[in-house]
Image (spheres, helix red, strand yellow):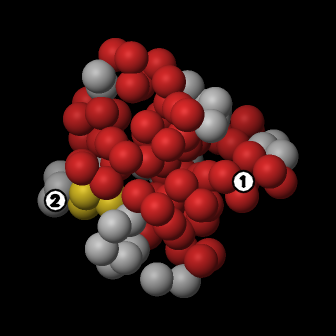
Amino acid sequence: MKLIAKTLIATAVLAASSFSAAQAQNMSGAEKQALIQNMLQADSNNDGMLFLSEFEVLIKLNADDGLGKAAMVERAGAYKKVFNRLDSNGDGALTKEEAQQLAEGRG
């Protein structure tokens, strides 16, 4: 999957689960790079979508890097709750299109 699409998904996931959209847009370059690297690592099958197990990995990696409120999601064990909120069509996968809707405030 193209890096831009992965960046979009990662930013939307972070924005929806950890930051306000404005905070996500104001992330430092290092934070954005860490988020992209975490997304690449979490998408274990490299299909460009995140399934719940991959989403859990992303949240854990983000928590380890101190990104957003991922540590809070991890402590609360709220992976599925947050994932379901992001998965607007309920198909069990967070897609580029869902991420774009979130990033644009339509999700």
Residue displayed at 30% across by 74% down = 45
86 left or right, relative to 19 = left
**N-terminal label among 1 and 2:** 1
Q: Residue 64: percent from the left, percent from the top?
A: 55, 34
Residue displayed at 34% across by 67% down = 44
Amino acid type, label 2 = Asp
Q: CA distance from mark 1 to mark 2?
A: 27 Å
* Residue 40 or residue 26, whichever sits in front: 40
Q: Residue 46: percent from the left, percent from the top?
A: 37, 76
Residue displayed at 24% across by 49% down = 52
Residue topped by disc 2 = 91
Crowding at label 1, few (<14), some or many (≥20) Cα neighbours within 10 Å? some
Residue 63 can be seen, yes or no: yes
Quarter of the figure with residue 77: top left
**Secondary element at image label 2:** loop
52 left or right, relative to 82 = left
Amino acid type, label 1 = Lys
Q: Do tag 1 and tag 2 residues touch (Cβ < 8 Å)?
A: no
Residue 10 can be seen, yes or no: no
Instruction: Classify 64 as above or below 3.
Output: above
* Residue 39 or residue 85, whichever sits in front: 39
Quarter of the figure with residue 94: bottom left
67 left or right, relative to 55 = right
* Residue 55 or residue 91, whichever sits in front: 55
Please tell me whether mark 1 or mark 2 is closer to you in this view: 1
Residue displayed at 59% across by 61% down = 37
**What is the number of the mark on residue 32?**
1
